[in-house]
């Protein structure tokens, strides 16, 4: 089976995430101007990529800069080679960071000034809600249990979740410190119906909490989104 | 099969990534365990995580999202996963290095949880 479309309608990161999460073997052919790149997926990762005479991770980093062009995703095509071992999520994050850095270098001073204005945290949480299937709620919460920004579907008592999860994360933090098991990166509570994920914001006493329907969201995707969005929220935090 | 044998079998499936694993009562005392890292204080971990498991049960009840199934802590050194067994009178704690594959750990814990519960003398 083949899926065809335009990169302006479905971005390459979305295509990669979708294909890797399905874990299927597939060939993704990309056309951008007169360039053609081919990515191969197997077992939930990108295993090979080729563009002109180049192969491997560098090809993925190059094609992540393509915002226009066409794609053709063909299921069941075996990879002709194996040139990539990095997990797809790390590959995507590294590649997107390179794209951001390149755009930053190219931006003029006016654009940089605009970019440096902090984003509204609630807007970021709203965007997060659109990215996470089965989204229930997301909050930026201090260690006093009070939220400073939140977004949720209707009928959810976000303040109660914030207060209760803060109690829990404080105990987990103390526990991990007493056991000398390193610094907490994230904490995930799985219930019958939901995942409740907490990720500390670097260098602050706040965390990003996300709740999502367990039957609709993919856990790997949820953790990836929490990493990506916590960085943006951290940048938007008033100092 | 005894709890100890099941935990040893689980250890062999984690191929060198296991730090410690224990089946623990809600009093914080382990009834069986395997410790691969001699520097890890599994008795203290059993007692302290019993408090975390108990609080998470109460939190899950308050936030009305169904009963708690498991808790996963990711630190810069390890993954620590606690999972309630059977009727919730015991929990199973597993600490593994960050080299472990999280998806495999969760899959194996799904496979072993019922066996561990069945092997606990009631």
Image (tube, grey):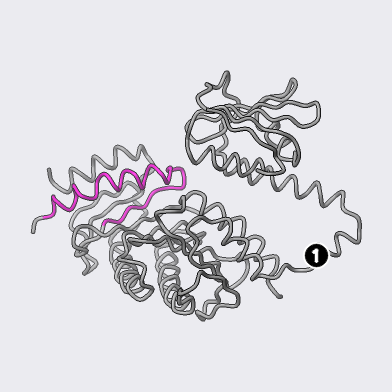
Dividing the image into 4 quarters, which one contains the C terminus of chain A? bottom right
Position of residue A216 relative to residue A11, above or below, is below
Q: How far from the left and from the top, in percent, is residue A77?
A: 53, 22
Depth order, front residue of B84/B28: B84
- How many other residues sit within 10 Å of disc 1, few (<14), some (14-19) or many (≥20)? few
The single residue placed furthest to the top in the displayed view is: A80
Query: Residue placed at 70% from the left, 68% from the top?
Result: A236
Give left or right: position of A50 versus B64: right
Query: In the rendered image, which quarter is residue B108 located in?
Result: top left
Q: Along the horizontal axis of the image, is A229 left or right of B40?
A: right
Residue at coordinates 61% horizontally, 65% vertically from top-left? Answer: A126
- Horizontally, residue A128 falls left or right of residue B77, namely right
- Is residue B2 located in the magenta-colored stretch of the structure? no
Tell me the magenta residue range. Answer: B92-120
The chain letter for the residue carrying disc 1 is A
Residue A51 location, quadrant: top right
- Secondary structure mostly seen in magenta is helix
Quadrant for residue A2, please give it: top right
Position of A185 relative to B110 (above/below):
below
Q: Where does label 1 land, which residue? A: A116
Instruction: Identify which residue, A198 or A192, lies in the foreground.
Output: A192
**Mark 1 secondary-structure assignment:** helix
Image location of residue A59, percent across then percent down: 70, 31
Residue A24 vs A174, above or below: the answer is: above
């Amino acid at each position: 089976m083949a899926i065809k479309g335009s990169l302006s309608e479905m971005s390459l990161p979305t295509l990669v995430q979708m294909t890797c999460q399905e874990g299927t073997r597939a060939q993704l052919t990309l056309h951008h101007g007169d360039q053609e790149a081919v990515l191969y997926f197997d077992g939930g990762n990108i295993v090979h990529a080729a563009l002109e005479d180049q192969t491997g991770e560098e090809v993925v980093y190059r094609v992540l800069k393509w915002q226009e062009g066409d794609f053709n995703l063909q299921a069941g095509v075996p990879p002709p080679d194996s040139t990539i071992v990095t997990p797809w999520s790390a590959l995507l994050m590294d590649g997107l960071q390179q794209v951001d850095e390149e755009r930053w270098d190219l931006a003029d001073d006016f654009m940089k000034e605009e970019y440096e204005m902090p984003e509204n945290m609630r807007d970021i949480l709203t965007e997060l809600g659109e990215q996470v299937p089965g989204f229930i709620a997301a909050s930026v919460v201090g260690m006093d249990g009070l939220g400073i920004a939140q977004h949720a579907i209707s009928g959810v008592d976000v303040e109660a979740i914030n207060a209760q999860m803060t109690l829990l994360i404080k105990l987990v933090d103390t526990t991990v410190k007493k056991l000398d098991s390193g610094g907490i990166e994230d904490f995930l509570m799985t219930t019958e119906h939901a995942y409740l994920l907490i990720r500390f914001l670097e260098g602050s006493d706040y965390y990003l909490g996300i709740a999502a329907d367990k039957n609709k969201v993919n856990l790997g995707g949820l953790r990836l989104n929490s990493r990506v969005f916590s960085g943006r929220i951290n940048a938007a935090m008033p100092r | 099969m005894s709890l100890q044998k099941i935990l040893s079998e689980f250890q062999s499936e984690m191929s060198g990534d296991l730090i410690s694993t224990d089946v623990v009562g809600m009093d914080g005392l382990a009834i069986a365990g395997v410790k691969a890292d001699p520097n890890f204080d599994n008795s203290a971990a059993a007692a302290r995580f019993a408090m975390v498991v108990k609080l998470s049960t109460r939190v899950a009840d308050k936030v009305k999202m169904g009963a708690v199934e498991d808790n996963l802590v990711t630190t810069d050194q390890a993954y620590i996963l606690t999972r309630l067994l059977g009727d919730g009178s015991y929990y199973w704690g597993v600490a593994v290095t960050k080299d472990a594959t999280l998806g495999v750990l969760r899959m194996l814990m799904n496979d072993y949880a019922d066996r561990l519960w069945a092997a606990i003398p009631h």
